[in-house]
Image: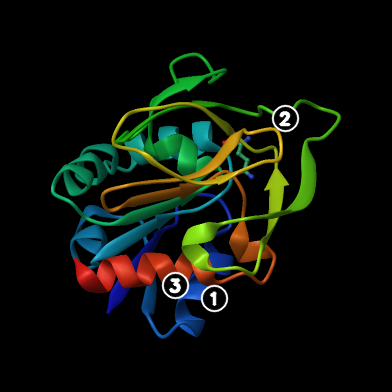
Amino acid sequence: MRIGVLALQGDVREHLRVLTALGAEAVAVRRPDELRSVRGLVLPGGESSVIDKLSRAFGMQHPIREAISSGMPMYGTCAGMILLADRITDGIVGQETFGGLDITVRRNAFGSQSDSFETDLDVPVLGDIPVHAAFIRAPLVTRTGDDVEVLARLDDGGVVAVRQGALLATSFHPEVSGESRFHQLFVDTVRAS
Ligand code: GLN
């Protein structure tokens, strides 16, 4: 089963490594024909405004939007979550997203003092063992539409993992903390699609 990682910018290699370890055929995706060859796509962490600009420059914005509307499973971490959000606040001027998830996210929501932190999260859909999550200049989900399932919250109630149909997104980076259950959930979604 071939799964792509959007490879315009960001932590592409880490995702390829986790997906490969889970038995998927993981490939870097930069061009529309590469997108057509995969059954699911990971949008990595990095800088969402840069990935947005490069996706337009490489002619990938429309193919990715079409893939989302046709139901291709996608998993976005951090910047990838921003790219899947229908609405963003604190984006740079002119910043666009692919959209698909009926959520509003605030970019860099955790301020300069705690740009980065790690914490353990309860994620009931993944079982009893908490997820060790690394937040790196992370976004926060500030609004969720009726069809959005909240998968994890911080202690203060802030939403940091969501799912809607075939789209999955986390504010944090499981791929950097040795956590593979979100990727497994995603691989299962791709297999079932
Ligand atoms: N702050 C970054 C952005 O706006 C996201 C950071 C990350 O992906 N680690 O895209």
Mark 1 → mark 3, Cα distance in angstroms: 13 Å
Residue highlighted by disc 1: 17
Q: Residue furthest right?
A: 113
The quadrant holding residue 100 is: top left
**Label 1, residues with CA under 10 Å away: few <14, some 14-19, many ≥20:** few
Quarter of the image with the C terminus is bottom left
Residue highlighted by disc 3: 184
Task: Kindly report which numbered mark, 2 or 1, lies closer to the viewer in this rendering.
Answer: 2
Which kind of residue does numbered mark 1 sit on?
Arg
> Measuring 29% from the left and 62% from the top, which residue is drawn there?
40
Mark 2 and 1 residues: CB-CB less than 8 Å, in contact?
Answer: no
Which kind of residue does numbered mark 2 sit on?
Phe
Ligand 1: image quarter: top right
> Measuring 60% from the left and 68% from the top, which residue is drawn there?
128
Mark 2 and 3 residues: CB-CB less than 8 Å, in contact?
Answer: no
Q: Earlier in the sequence, mark 2 or mark 1?
A: 1
Mark 2 → mark 3, Cα distance in angstroms: 28 Å
Judging from the image, the colouring scheme is rainbow
The quadrant holding residue 74 is: bottom left
Badge number at residue 148: none
Residue highlighted by disc 2: 110
Which kind of residue does numbered mark 3 sit on?
Gln
Question: Disc 2 on helix, strand or loop?
Answer: loop
Spot occupied by residue 81 in the image (x, y as percentages of width and height): 47, 41
Q: Is 112 positioned to the left or the right of 52 in the image?
A: right
